[in-house]
Image (cartoon, grey):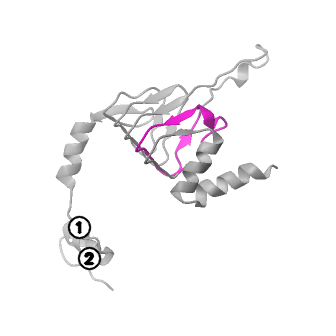
Amino acid sequence: MKLKPILQKLKLRYGSQETVIHTLRGMGVRIGEGCRIYTTDFGGEPWLIKIGDRVCISNDVTFVNHGLNWPFQEKYESLTGFGPIEIGDNCQIGIRATILPFVCIGANCIVGACSVVTKSVPPDSVVAGNPARVICSMEEYEKKCVARHIDIPLDREAARRVLEVHFWGDEADSS
């Protein structure tokens, strides 16, 4: 087994964000500025993936940049099924999402956790499900987020107390 792929996986899993971005660019992924990437699965053709500026890709997101054509291999000498994946600026991809080939996710989008994105996503959309479907606009989602906002202190213990009182209604027993 070659050492280079093993070192790349280690850098992607345990490296700083700077190391992750540098490693992915070295693998051929086109990445914009200000991104946060926490996954390691960029498929067999990482050079077919393009990520815009200010994109956050959560843990265990899978990029699949080839199709299923194995059953036809005896019928055709060389049948290819590769396709690019493009993520626009200012997007967030939720944990364990899967993005299939020929998908373009427009700017200002959110892909929900565990979603399977089988077709392109229009800009300013929130999608979720299997297959992923538009569930609301970014404007609607922003209103939901603002309505659920809770001011919490930066100190972790103080934040815990505020959240316990907010959600459980009384001071929690700290024992």
- Which segment is the magenta one? 39-64
Q: CA distance from mark 1 to mark 2?
A: 8 Å
Q: Is residue 53 left or right of residue 158?
A: right
Q: Answer with mark 1 or mark 2, whichever residue precedes in sequence.
A: 1
Look at 72% across and 24% down and name the residue there.
70
Query: Quarter of the image holding residue 108?
Result: top left
Can the viewer see residue 159 in this picture? yes
Image spot of residue 80 (x, y percent): 69, 21
Kind of element beneath mark 2:
helix
Image spot of residue 66 (x, y percent): 63, 29
Which residue, given by chain and number where applicable, does mark 1 sit on? Answer: 152
Can the viewer see residue 41 in this picture? no
Image spot of residue 45 (x, y percent): 65, 34
Query: Disc 2 residue type?
Result: Ala
Look at 47% across and 41% down and name the residue there.
32
Q: Is residue 153 left or right of residue 55?
A: left
1 and 2 marks in contact (CB < 8 Å): yes
Query: Disc 1 residue type?
Result: Ile
Is residue 151 one of those drawn in magenta? no
Look at 51% across and 56% down and name the residue there.
17
Which residue, given by chain and number where applicable, does mark 2 sit on? Answer: 158
How packed is label 2: few (under 14 Cα within 10 Å), some, or many (20 or more)?
A: few
Kind of element beneath mark 1:
loop
